[in-house]
């Protein structure tokens, strides 16, 4: 049954719900990663000029030591700073390939924006599912 706002109500709910679920994946996975991650401080090992789209930047490698004494390397880090600069790292001890830069912007900005999109989409789904009562004409 079509809604009075135009378009199919069911298809809007399904598409909005699926998009919201996809948008929620990044923040949820970041929270789960942060719960099991271990902090480390690394240092920029190499920094070379690189091209990021149309702008020039610096890309480099960051080397850090894990809690068990082994060495980890993050490659292709964007704008790491000059060689020797300390860099805060988070890594998952259970998955040596899962390592991320630590910090409020570097770790949380993308997931926070994704969460905002999910809330916007869920609000649209809620409006379609619960359209409200028409105003009383008294």
Image (spheres, helix red, strand yellow):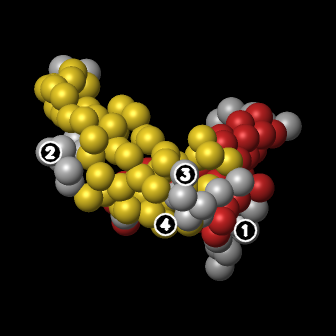
Q: Nearer the viewer, mark 1 or mark 2?
A: 2
Q: What residue is disc 2 on? A: 82
Q: Residue, x 26% and y 58% (percent of image)?
A: 86
Q: Nearer the viewer, mark 1 or mark 4?
A: 4
Q: Nearer the viewer, residue 89 or 1?
A: 89
Q: Residue, x 43% and y 41% (percent of image)?
A: 74
Q: What residue is disc 3 on? A: 70
Q: Residue, x 67% and y 74% (percent of image)?
A: 136
Distance (Cα) linking label 3 and label 1: 63 Å
User: Is 101 displayed left or right of 15 in the figure?
Assistant: left
Q: What residue is disc 1 on? A: 133
Distance (Cα) linking label 1 and label 2: 61 Å
Q: Check disc 4: other Cα within 10 Å, few if <14, some if 14-19, many if 20+.
A: some
Q: Nearer the viewer, residue 123 or 20?
A: 20
Distance (Cα) linking label 3 and label 2: 24 Å
Q: Is residue 90 visible?
A: yes
Distance (Cα) linking label 1 and label 4: 52 Å
Tell me which numbered mark, 3 or 4, is placed earlier along the sequence. 4
Residue 39 is tagged as: 4
């Amino acid at each position: 049954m079509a809604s009075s706002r135009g378009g199919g109500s069911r298809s809007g709910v399904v598409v909005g719900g699926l998009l919201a679920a996809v948008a929620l994946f990044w923040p949820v996975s970041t929270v789960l990663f942060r719960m099991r991650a271990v902090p480390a401080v690394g240092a920029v090992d190499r920094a070379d000029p690189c091209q990021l789209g149309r702008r020039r930047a610096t890309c480099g490698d960051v080397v850090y030591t894990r809690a068990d004494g082994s060495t980890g390397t993050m490659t292709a880090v964007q704008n790491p700073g000059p060689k020797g600069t300390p860099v805060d790292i988070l890594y998952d001890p259970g998955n040596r390939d899962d390592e991320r830069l630590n910090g409020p912007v570097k770790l949380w900005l993308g997931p926070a924006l994704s969460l905002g999109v999910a809330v916007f989409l869920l609000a649209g789904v809620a409006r379609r599912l619960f359209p409200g009562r028409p105003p009383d004409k008294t």
